[in-house]
């Protein structure tokens, strides 16, 4: 595993630039070696901040002194030689000569060349003449290499590589200089490794503590502990992980909350700069959890069995009495760090419960949820402390979890109550839904059926509208032809009149049906001679019945029968019933028309029966024979399917009733179909 500390350094150092090669620069070997070793010793002695800076400065010195184009340093992080630390330096004209992938190949080549072969003396390599696999992957810019491996305490701990981008012969003075500074570089590499190991151990310890804290928060979030127990455990775990001397958790109980709405929160109002004029909410602050080494509970059992904590936490103060708490509502930052050395420290007047005078560093972070401040977390250190960003992030995470704990606890009872209520409602709802389920299935089937009826009606009405219009257009075109005789003109005009009458009747039927369904008008009753009207209607239809080979028999009362009804509606009902009987009767059969006057009911009733013989109506068709747009299946008789629907609407308009029966005839495929119309015999006053 290889780790690159710094690649492509862009810094410009004030180092004397030597003349470009091939001019020799090592004329005073001893003096240059002494100067370079002295400079490297200074770098090692003062390089306390960062290991990558230390290696970068050494690479800069080596690359400049040797007047190389590229310097690569590799340090071994352990004795197994499987983890390397590398840094790379380029002369200023060659800062972007190699890509990161090419640099990785160079580092690999240098490690294989020096570390695996234990190069004790400086090695010069003419890369342009190598023909092995590694060389084939190297950049073409690399021409000449001067390299050596470093040893510390008898073990190889790194390698130095100086590379030129042109063909070059390294002289003996340059090799001797590299050999002279090898011990100093070995010391520097060891220092880098030790610094990195120390840093990794520190980060590892902190990471372990933080990971442990996160695991505890996760476990507590899914536990069934009481709120006070959970808050105490979180406070204890946080204080121990951050290694503070005291930890407090303070919650606010509002008597008159002003900032429960984020829009009303002064922190969310950038226009409000008068902090002293901002009213504070009336609230009581209570310490609900505390930790310090003298009162430390390491397990849940100790916490549950201890009464000391419960008694000691009965401490409260008014929110307005603590300046630090007031700042939570007036400052835009939810984090407050109080340092005893701060010049503004004397202006603060915190609550005595915080005991800030006993601690050099005090950190306060608010617990917020949707703009409402639920409380604060207080962490205190007796010695001065600089809080790291990672520590502040961890505290913020803990505060977010605590806010969730508190909100969940406050809403749990309400939720439980609502759950009970909803459960009961759900039980009742399931009972209702069980009853509605079957009804819904029926509704769906009916909707599908109505959709089919709509499609069928659109098709029928389109035909009924298109064919007359087509005949009318053809008649008009023929009338415009030159030389048409008067006889043909008369025929064409008759066709126009007949087809126009059909269109008008169809539209009138639709309008009448719509008007009847909307109950826009009431029936206008008058005295009607029923016997005379029936004879007149039968006479009008006699010609059509003869063409169909049908006969009609009338069964009417002998005495005069008058009825109070609406004449136009009655005529239309009788015409439609007789027309329907003619359409669906078998050829050569008889239509029986019977009128019965019943005086046994209140009020008196007139019953009219129209019976014909034809194809039977199935029980399924009987259920919807009076529906709009319905026509008998398998029957190809022309029509729109509005006749019986119009009859039913007219009968209801007259406050009557109509029914149909289909009775099969014995030893025959035909049936006897009977439509029974019942009308009340009412007076004009009624």
Image (spheres, rainbow, N blue to C red):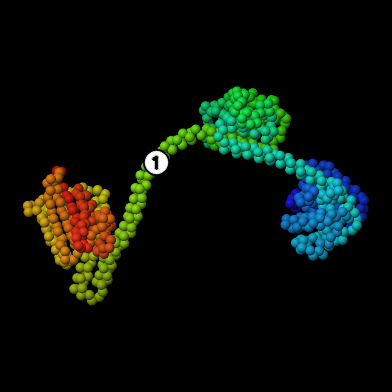
Q: State the quadrant of the C terminus.
A: top left
Residue at image coords 20%, 52% = 658
- Which is more toward the observer, 565 or 645? 645
Residue 479 against residue 87 in the figure, above or below: below
Residue 4 x, y percent position in the rendering: 75, 51
Residue at image coords 19%, 49% = 656
Secondary structure category for the residue under label 1: helix
Q: Residue furthest left?
A: 559
The picture quadrant where one finds residue 120 is bottom right
Residue 101 x, y percent position in the rendering: 72, 57
Residue at image coords 80%, 53% = 72
Residue at image coords 87%, 61% = 169
Q: Residue furthest front?
A: 667
Q: Is residue 567 left or right of residue 329?
A: left
Q: Judge whether residue 174 can be spotted in this image.
A: no
- Which is more toward the observer, 482 or 158? 158
Circle 1 Cα neighbour tier, 10 Å, few/some/many (<14 / 14–19 / ≥20): few
Q: Is residue 516 left or right of residue 607?
A: right
Residue 14 x, y percent position in the rendering: 82, 49
The picture quadrant where one finds residue 281 is top right
Q: How many marks?
A: 1
The picture quadrant where one finds residue 213 is top right
Q: Is residue 595 left or right of residue 350?
A: left
- Which is more toward the observer, 306 or 389? 306
Residue 403 against residue 667 in the figure, above or below: above
- Which is more toward the observer, 93 or 683? 683
Q: Judge whether residue 609 can be spotted in this image.
A: yes
Per the image, the residue denoted by label 1 is: 429
């Amino acid at each position: 595993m290889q780790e690159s500390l710094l690649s492509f350094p862009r810094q410009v150092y004030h180092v004397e630039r030597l003349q470009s090669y091939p001019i020799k620069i090592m004329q005073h070997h001893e003096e240059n070696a002494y100067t370079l070793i002295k400079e490297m010793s200074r770098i090692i002695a003062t390089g306390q901040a960062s290991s990558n800076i230390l290696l970068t400065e050494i690479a800069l010195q080596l690359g400049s002194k040797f007047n190389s184009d590229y310097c690569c340093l590799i340090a071994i992080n352990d004795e197994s030689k499987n983890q390397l630390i590398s840094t790379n330096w380029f002369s200023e004209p060659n800062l972007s000569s190699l890509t990161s992938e090419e640099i990785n190949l160079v580092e690999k080549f240098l490690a294989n060349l020096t570390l695996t072969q234990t190069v004790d003396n400086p090695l010069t390599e003419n890369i342009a003449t190598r023909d092995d696999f590694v060389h084939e992957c190297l950049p073409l810019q690399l021409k000449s290499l001067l390299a050596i491996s470093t040893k510390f305490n008898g073990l190889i701990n790194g390698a130095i590589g100086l590379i030129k981008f042109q063909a070059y012969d390294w002289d003996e003075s340059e090799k001797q200089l590299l050999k002279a500074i090898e011990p100093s570089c070995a010391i520097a590499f060891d220092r880098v490794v030790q610094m990195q190991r120390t840093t990794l151990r520190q980060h590892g310890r902190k990471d372990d503590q933080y990971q442990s804290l996160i695991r505890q928060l996760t476990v507590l979030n899914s536990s069934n502990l009481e709120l006070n127990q959970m808050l105490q455990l979180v406070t204890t775990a946080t204080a121990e992980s951050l290694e503070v001397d005291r930890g407090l958790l303070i919650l606010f109980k509002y008597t008159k909350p002003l900032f429960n709405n984020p829009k009303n929160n002064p922190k969310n109002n950038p226009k409000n700069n008068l902090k002293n004029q901002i009213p504070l909410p009336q609230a009581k602050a209570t310490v609900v959890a505390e930790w310090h080494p003298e009162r430390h509970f390491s397990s849940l059992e100790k916490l549950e069995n201890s009464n000391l904590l419960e008694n000691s936490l009965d401490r409260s103060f008014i929110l307005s009495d603590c300046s630090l708490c007031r700042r939570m509502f007036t400052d835009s930052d939810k984090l407050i760090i109080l340092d005893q050395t701060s010049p503004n420290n004397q202006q603060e007047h915190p609550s005595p419960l915080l005991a800030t005078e006993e601690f050099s560093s005090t950190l306060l972070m608010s617990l917020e949820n949707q703009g409402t401040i639920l409380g604060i977390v207080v962490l205190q250190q007796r010695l001065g402390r600089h809080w790291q960003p990672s520590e502040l992030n961890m505290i913020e995470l803990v505060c977010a979890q605590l806010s969730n704990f508190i909100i969940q606890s406050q809403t749990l009872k309400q939720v439980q109550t609502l759950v009970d209520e909803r459960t009961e409602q759900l039980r009742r709802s399931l009972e209702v839904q069980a009853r509605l389920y079957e009804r819904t299935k029926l509704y769906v089937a009916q909707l599908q059926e109505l959709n089919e009826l709509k499609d069928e009606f659109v098709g029928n009405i389109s035909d009924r509208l298109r064919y007359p219009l087509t005949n009318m257009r053809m008649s008009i075109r023929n009338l415009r032809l030159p030389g048409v005789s008067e006889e043909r003109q008369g025929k064409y005009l008759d066709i126009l009149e007949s087809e126009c009458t059909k269109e008008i009747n169809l539209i009138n039927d639709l309008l009448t049906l719509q008007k009847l369904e909307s109950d826009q008008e009431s029936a206008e009753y008058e005295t009607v001679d029923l016997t005379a009207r029936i004879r007149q209607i039968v006479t009008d239809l006699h010609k059509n019945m003869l063409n169909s080979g049908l006969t009609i028999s009338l069964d009417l009362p002998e005495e005069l029968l008058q009825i109070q009804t609406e004449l136009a509606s009655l005529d239309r009902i009788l015409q439609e019933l007789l027309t329907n009987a003619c359409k669906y009767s078998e050829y050569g059969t008889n239509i029986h028309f019977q009128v019965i006057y019943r005086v046994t009911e209140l009020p008196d009733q007139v019953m009219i029966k129209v019976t014909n013989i034809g194809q039977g109506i199935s029980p399924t068709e009987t259920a919807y024979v009076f529906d709009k747009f319905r026509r008998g299946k398998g029957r190809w008789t022309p029509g729109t399917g509005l006749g019986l629907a119009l009859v039913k609407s007219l009968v209801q308009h007259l406050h009557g009733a109509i029914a149909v029966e289909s009775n099969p005839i014995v030893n025959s495929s035909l049936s006897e179909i009977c439509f029974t119309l019942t009308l009340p015999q009412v007076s004009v006053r009624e």
